[in-house]
Amino acid sequence: MQPSPSFLGNQLAQKHLSSLLASNNIPQALLFSGPEGVGKATLAKAFAKSLLNSKKQDHPDLSILTPEGKSLTHPIENIRALINDFALPPYEATRKIVLIEDAERMLPYAANALLKILEEPPIYGYLILTSSHPDKLLPTILSRCTEIPFQPLSKADILTYLSAHSDRHDLDQLATLSQGSLSRVQNLLEGTLDPAPIIEFITHGTPLDGDPEELLPLLHYWFRDLHLLKAGGNPAHIFYKDHIDLLHGQLQKPLPSLEELHYRLTDALEASQRGIKLKTTSSLLT
């Protein structure tokens, strides 16, 4: 199996998949699980091509399903078409493969329909699911899949990517904000790393208005800095180094726990991805 030479991180997942190929003992249902932007879909496609012994970009025996529409879900019609197509033997290869990206976005009736082929897949059929939220998959689907876990990329890996793709002066901050996600850092590169909205909220209570993908991680790091200072941590690790006096001035105020803050900001981010506008920050933290 040969992903792009520039593929970063997750060597253990790569090694596991290469071992499966070498043994020729391939589970018929695999789940690539882990955070967004760490290479799950990239490796899944490389693995599928290796199973087909082909380098074709569009192989007739490889189907890739991605979420559709404003709600970004997998329509039941696509799952039914998959079931019908799976009943047919391969066109060119000895195997037929379906890759379902973001599988947690299957609605319950679509997920239940998928169980039909997970329970009794044809001998030539292989399913590969990717998911950033495997906890949202039906337990019956999880139990029928062999899981390949993926981890966030290291900060060193992210900096390697950034150094090759940008000459900005704030690469270290970008790498920190990426939280090990290559897709997140790519989004950050397309925008501007501007902490001004966070500072305006902190000092004047101004509601956040902008891209949640940028604003919510910036907000998280403000409170992370406060917790770090309150615990007597090393000031060298402060993200908002240019606002250290303002941080010290906030230390006497009650702080939400980082765990609670993480869940609230994650919920807000997922809501924004479904088209729900970011609400005022004060409502997220109270």
Image: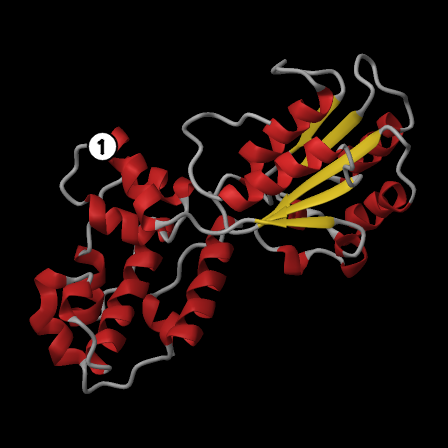
Relative vertical location of residue 81 with respect to residue 52 in this rendering, above or below: below
Camera-nearest residue between 19 and 154: 19
Q: Position of residue 120 (x, y in %)?
A: 92, 42
Q: Is residue 270 left or right of residue 33?
A: left
Camera-nearest residue between 43 and 35: 43
In this view, the residue farthest toward the front is 23
Neighbourhood count class around disc 1 (C-alpha, 10 Å): few under 14, some 14–19, many 20 upward: few
| The image quarter in which residue 96 lies | top right
Give the residue type that dot 1 points to. Ser
Does the rendering let one see residue 24? Answer: yes
| The image quarter in which residue 279 lies | bottom left
Relative vertical location of residue 119 with respect to residue 216 in this rendering, above or below: above
Q: Which residue does the image show at 32% across and 49% down from the upper left?
A: 155
Q: Which residue does the image show at 39% across and 50% down from the upper left?
A: 180
Q: Position of residue 265 (x, y in %)?
A: 42, 64
Q: Position of residue 205 (x, y in %)?
A: 22, 70
**Residue at mark 1:** 166
Q: Which residue does the image show at 24% across and 67% down from the upper left?
A: 222
